[in-house]
Image: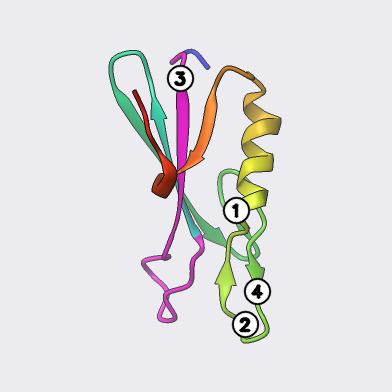
Amino acid sequence: MELKPNAIVYNIEQYGLSDTRELAALRLIIQGQEKYYVFLDFRREERLKETGIPVSGDKRSNRYIDEEAVKSFLRTHIGDKNITFCSYWNARLK
């Protein structure tokens, strides 16, 4: 919060060390006053290591991060209603 971000953009990505190309890595791009900051979080067992966001599995045991779990984490831990949270694919930062 000391960066005073206007927006936080999230991207759910393939986990680079996985043979199955699972979608179990998270990138947060934080727009500060003068710079962008990038935070990466990777799976450790059934959760992301740093944020603790759960990693789910589908019927074929493909691992993924639920987008609603990411949004819930950001709302809970950031709490500032003036900060915009959006997916990388929908981001329109000023």
Whole-number angstrom distance, CA of label 3 to CA of label 1: 20 Å
Mark closest to the chain's N terminus, 3 or 2: 3
The 10 Å Cα crowd at callout 4, few under 14, some 14 to 19, many 20 or more, is some
Q: Which residue is mark 3?
A: 6
Query: The residue tagged with tag 2: helix, strand or loop?
Result: loop
Whole-number angstrom distance, CA of label 1 to CA of label 2: 18 Å
Disc 2 vs disc 4: Cβ atoms closer than 8 Å? yes
Q: Say which of marks 4 and 1 sits in front.
A: 1
Q: Is residue 75 placed above or below 28 in the rendered structure?
A: above
* Horizontal side, residue 2 vs residue 60: left or right: left
Disc 4 vs disc 3: Cβ atoms closer than 8 Å? no
Q: Which residue does the image show at 53% across and 27% down from the upper left? A: 84
Mark closest to the chain's N terminus, 1 or 2: 2
Q: Say which of marks 1 and 2 sits in front.
A: 1
Q: Which residue is mark 1?
A: 67
Measured as percent of width and height from the top left, residue 30 is found at 41, 29
Whole-number angstrom distance, CA of label 4 to CA of label 1: 13 Å
Mark closest to the chain's N terminus, 4 or 1: 4
Task: Indicate the amino acid at tag 4.
Answer: Gly
Q: Which residue is mark 2?
A: 61
